[in-house]
Image (cartoon, rainbow, N blue to C red):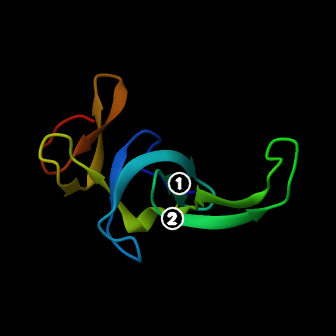
Amino acid sequence: MIKLKIKSGDIVRVIAGDHKGSEGKVLRVYREKNKAIVEGVNMVSKHTKPSAKNPQGGIVKKEASIQISNISLIDPKTKETTRVGIRVEGDKKVRFSKKSNQVL
């Protein structure tokens, strides 16, 4: 399994695919599938039956997962997409932005 540099709570931009240019917060990361769910991106319609939770039933909009390779982290300092590196500071590994060299 590869080391993913995108984590839940990161602000990312979609760099490829139908939703190119969209931005959002990472809600969940699936390491085994190399996918992530980004808030407000890749919305799909799901038809649901009436249930106790949703007595009306109908069509529900929800986010679908998107490949990790299609998203890029936004640098908090420059507000542009950046690559992420990992370095050791003291006895801890930290993520840093390759553009601004700032710890994330």
On the image, the x and y values in percent for residue 59 come to 69, 63
> In this rendering, would 96 be left or right of 43?
left
Tag 1 secondary structure: strand
Question: As shown in the figure, which amino acid type bears the numbered disc 1?
Answer: Ile
Q: Which amino acid does label 2 sit on?
A: Ile
Residue 85 showing in the rendered view = yes
Quarter location, residue 71? bottom left
* Residue name at image x 58 percent, y 53 percent: 31
Q: In this view, does 69 lie above or below 38?
A: below
Q: Which of marks 1 and 2 is nearer the N terminus?
A: 1
Q: Which of 2 and 82 is in front in this view?
A: 82
On the image, the x and y values in percent for residue 44 come to 59, 66
Q: Which mark is residue 66?
A: 2
Marks counted in the figure total 2
Residue closer to the observer: 71 or 85: 71
Q: Quadrant of the N terminus?
A: bottom right
Image quadrant containing the C terminus: top left
Q: Position of residue 87 (x, y in %)?
A: 28, 39
Seen as rendered, the residue at the extreme bottom is 18
Q: Residue at x 41, y 77 (%)?
A: 18
Tell me the quarter of the picture where residue 20 sits: bottom left
Q: Residue 37 carries which label?
A: 1
Q: Residue at x 13, y 51 (%)?
A: 99
Image-based side of 92 in relation to 75, left or right = right
Label 2 Cα crowd, 10 Å radius (few <14 / some 14-19 / many 20+): many
Disc 1 and disc 2 in contact, CB within 8 angstroms: yes
| Left or right position of 76 against 11 | left
Q: Which residue is drawn at 80% across and 52% down?
A: 56
Question: How far across and how far down the image is residue 64, in percent?
Answer: 58, 62
